[in-house]
Amino acid sequence: MRDQDDARLLAIAELNLEATALGEAALASDWEEARFRSVRINTLAFDLRSQRVAQTARDIACALGAPGRQPAPGYGLKISLLSKVIGQLFENHLGGGSTPPT
């Protein structure tokens, strides 16, 4: 059981790193990289069975839009929400979360 907990914690840490990279890409206006990271986060969240994180990542991908286009207004708020949702996932993993597991 401990190995599974460690593996899940590492996967959540990877989500966090990807979210950081997504935010950095957005700050640099590197929309292709931001799109790539949002899809990567969706895939990782799906593997973790975290519907909230996956849905938030899909919302970001939609807000970023198609390649070659500028993102829709509100994409930054969605990226901020992603950080919060990943934080809740981490807290839930540690057993200290006040929200139900995702």
Image (cartoon, rainbow, N blue to C red):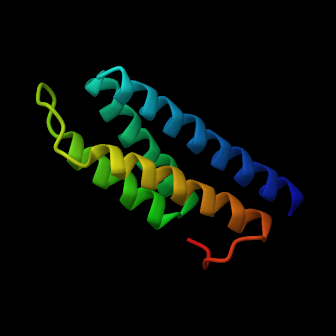
In the visual, does 4 lie left or right of 47?
right
Rendered residue at 45%/26% (across/down): 24
Above/below status of 11 relative to 23: below
Above/below status of 3 relative to 102: above
Q: Please provide percent x and percent y for residue 84.
A: 53, 56
Rendered residue at 71%/63% (across/down): 91
How many numbered callouts? 0
Rendered residue at 61%/77% (across/down): 99
Q: Please provide percent x and percent y for residue 78.
A: 35, 52
Rendered residue at 35%/20% (across/down): 28
Q: Please provide percent x and percent y for residue 48.
A: 57, 58
In the visual, does 13 lie left or right of 46?
right
Quadrant, the C terminus: bottom right
Quadrant, the N terminus: bottom right
In the visual, does 76 lie left or right of 21?
left
In the visual, does 41 lie left or right of 1?
left
Above/below status of 54 relative to 96: above
**Residue lying farthest to the left in this orientation:** 69
**Residue lying farthest to the right in this orientation:** 2
Q: Please provide percent x and percent y for residue 30.
A: 30, 21
